[in-house]
Image: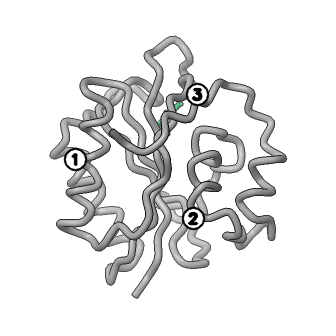
Amino acid sequence: MNIAYLSLGSNEGDRAAMLRQAIDALNHQPGSVVAVSHVYETAAWGVTDQPDFLNIAVALETSLYAPGLLQSIRAIEAGLGRQRHIRWGPRTIDIDILFFNNDIIDTPDLQLPHPRLQERRFVLQPLAGIAPALVHPVFGRTMSELLLLCPDELEVTDWGVLP
Ligand code: GSY
């Protein structure tokens, strides 16, 4: 069995419902969601002139390998209305693979660990809640340490458990 850590975000439609539906779909298809972080309302990163996101991190046990998981995630995103028009623009759901075991992958379709996770408080804050001692296989730092070192100053507000 493999363990993947995922970041989920939504800033279009009923954001909390989108996150719940994405968790249901992950449980239905590629594996079992074994941990869900608090939900955070977060200012948009990248293109900042867009609505705030709700973000969570989850741990997923799966028998798929990373490329199969990516394919399954893309199908879930499409099923939840995700359209890939504007890079870093608003979206009903976004699911990013952050880690897949300790794998290091660098292909055009998939880079693992996620190459920008250490720059994003909206990723690290939820992730450190469910996996504080998880060690980044390249940087050798835990998620708690990366959160302390993160330079991102965009606002991240803890909403508690996903409603
Ligand atoms: O990369 C994930 C999609 N996304 C997000 C996000 O999930 N949260 C915040 N706060 N900003 C974002 N910008 C993008 S693109």
Q: Relative to 27, is 111 on the left or the right?
A: right
Camera-nearest residue between 129 and 112:
129
Disc marking residue 101:
none
**Quarter residue 44 falls in:** top right
User: First in sequence: mark 3 or mark 2?
Assistant: 3
Camera-nearest residue between 113 and 57:
57
Disc marking residue 112:
2
**Location of residue 12 in the rendering, given as x and y in whole percent from the top left corner:** 31, 24
Q: Amino acid at mark 3?
A: Trp
**Quadrant (top left/top right/bottom left/bottom right) for the N terminus:** bottom left
Disc marking residue 45:
3
The residue pinned by badge 1 equals 21
Q: Amino acid at mark 1?
A: Gln
Q: Nearer the viewer, mark 3 or mark 1?
A: 1
**Disc 3 within 8 angstroms of ligand 1 (CB):** yes
Q: Amino acid at mark 2?
A: Leu
- Give the class, few, some or many, for how many residues have Cα within 10 Å of label 1's Cα (few <14, many ≥20): some
The residue drawn where x is 28% and y is 63% is 71
Dot 3 falls on a residue whose secondary structure is loop
Q: Nearer the viewer, mark 2 or mark 1?
A: 1
**Disc 2 within 8 angstroms of ligand 1 (CB):** no
How has the structure been colored for display?
one colour
Camera-nearest residue between 35 and 76:
35
The residue drawn where x is 39% and y is 49% is 95
